[in-house]
Amino acid sequence: MSMPTFVSALSPRLGSITSVAVCGLLLAVPASAQVFAPGPSLPGLFDSVLDVPSPPPVGVSVSGGVGGVAGQTTQLNLNTNGSATNNFTAASGAEVNIDGGTVGNNFTSLDASEVNLLSGNIGLNFRADSNRVGISGGNIDDGFTADIGARVNLSGGSIGENFRALAGSVVNVSGGNIGRDFTASGNSTVNVSGGSIGERFTADSITLDITGGTVGSNLDAINNTTLNISGTADVSNNLDVGSGSVANISGGTIGPGAEALAGGVVNISGTADVSRVDAENGGVVNISGGEVGVGVRVETGGEMNISGGLVRNGMLAFAGSSVHVSGGIVTDLFEVFNDAEVEISGGNVGRFMDIEGTVDVTGGALDSSARVFGGGVLNLSSGSVGNGIEALDGSSVIITGGDFGFGTMARSFSLIDISGGTVGHNFTGEVASVVNISGGTIGDNFETDGVVNLTGGAFAGSFEATANAQVNLFGSDFELDGVPVAGLTPNVPTTIYTRGGVTLTATLEDGTPFDLDLNTLTPPNPGDDFVDFDATLTVTLISSALLGDYNDSGQVEQADLDFVLQNWGDTDVSDVTAWVNFPGGNPFDGLVDQNELDGVLLNWGDSTAPDFTGTPVPEPAAALVLSTLALTPRRRI
């Protein structure tokens, strides 16, 4: 091998270069005591030590340079005015310390070498290959590559644009800054606890931990990346989490535009402060803590699960999206678009929700002033819904349990079905609205100008039916001032015209006693019932006798047809005493024949109990047809 040429004398232990150009190869026998530790090592650990330039005599300014390769056990110290030329290489086992000096372009540090930049400059396209690089000051120009196995520690100084961290490399950033277009890929690891990284950071199939410092806009986590953000981290706009990737945000601050893309998951917890987060088609956002700012969006095909934390105003759930709230707080102005599905099983959702899709409240609380638009459905089975709920044209509200607040408004051509729970006072039904009540408890001052089908439930106060109202009662024991209403035909409505303060009493189909004072005083006294002269009031006697319902199940169905077919022509049916509702009356007439078959076929599907669940809301063109009973013959009383 050729030996280096020096233009100066060397001391016995340390090589000193005052005004020199070093060319060729710098090699030595490996130093047995050499170790790799942060920062420059003790010179005594190396066989050769080169100081470029060497310390000058007092008052003398010197410069120097080297080129080629720093050998295996060589320590090269580039001080102020010292330089290494382009294409310089630090061989395995070498250490290069730059404190005011300069290394040209295309610097390569090989496996097991060490580079420490305290001040000074390294040129373009520095490549660290499976070695240790410590940067506490100075500057590295664009195009730095941390190759397989490299370990880069940045605590100060700066690295230019287009930094690449390749497979198996580790980059620790605790200070300083890295320019834009940083790409980390191939199972590399990046830890950011301080300093700053510029815009357009791409994390591709890596582990990225950000506990402090600042990361610029357009941070993309793609292809099975795990991104952990905590502590005092500050991530600017447009955090995108793509297919197979997971972002765990438990602290720090995230700017607007965070998105879970298709196949991506964003988990927000702890003390995280996220300006806004979106769940795109196929993306999932889970919020269990922290705070999320205004304008959250759940796009078509997106999913959002909220079990804790705080989500600010203006959340949007678009068509085909899914939102589940089991805890935490979602504040006001939540909009649920057509075909979106929202379930509230816990937590609290704020005021002014607009519903075009479906909202199921199975627990927790939906606050006041929600509006249900045409095609929208609000279901309450448990939990609570606040005051001032408005059901608009073409909407449905289904209450099977829970606590529904006061001041409910059923607008024209809306449907409200109440089978359980409690509904507060001051309920109002406009003309052509439909309200079906089969259970539950209704508060004081219930007023309707539409259709009410009443088969059960209890009223805690006054009931008012204004001029356009149609009130249909289903049950038994109908009496006017204690006198039974005569001539009632089972399952046929009878219109009641009597007014003048007479009291109508009944037992509703669910067994609940009911009374209605037929007052016409306008306006009614506070707490009094009121039934306008022009309002329609019908009673229907519900009978368990239903022709063709031979097993008395309440419906003419397959079991009744099976009885006829299996016993056709028989006169001796051993279990016939358990069967009822024969065409010829009870008991059985002695022959299973066409009469019994007609009883099934002519009454197929009939039921003893009217089922108003899901009653179609009247269309505006059918405003005069206010009930499914409108075309049914009625008796007059």
Image: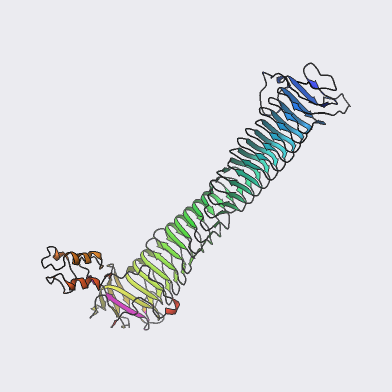
Residue at screen point 48% across, 57% down: 322
Q: Is residue 522 left or right of residue 32?
A: left
* Residue in the foreground of this view, choosing between 506 and 536: 536
Q: Is residue 249 visible?
A: no
Q: Quadrant of the C terminus?
A: bottom left
* Residue in the foreground of this view, choosing between 236 and 407: 236
Q: Considering only vertical position in the picture, is 31 above or below 262? A: above
Q: Residue furthest left?
A: 572
Q: Is residue 75 visible?
A: yes
Residue at screen point 69% across, 45% down: 180
Q: Residue furthest right?
A: 59
Residue 540 in magenta? Answer: yes
Q: Considering only vertical position in the picture, is 411 above or below 243? A: below
Q: How many marks?
A: 0
x and y, in percent, of residue 58 in the image: 87, 25
Q: Residue furthest front?
A: 1
Give the magenta-colored segment's residue range: 531-544
Q: Considering only vertical position in the picture, is 550 above or below 89? A: below
Q: Is residue 531 left or right of residue 197?
A: left
Coloration of the structure image: rainbow
Q: Residue 523 lies in what quarter of the image?
A: bottom left
x and y, in percent, of residue 290 in the image: 55, 49
* Residue in the foreground of this view, choosing between 484 and 36: 36
x and y, in percent, of residue 182 in the image: 66, 43
Q: Is residue 426 left or right of residue 301?
A: left
Residue 146 in magenta? Answer: no
x and y, in percent, of residue 191 in the image: 62, 38
Q: Considering only vertical position in the picture, is 625 above or below 247? A: below
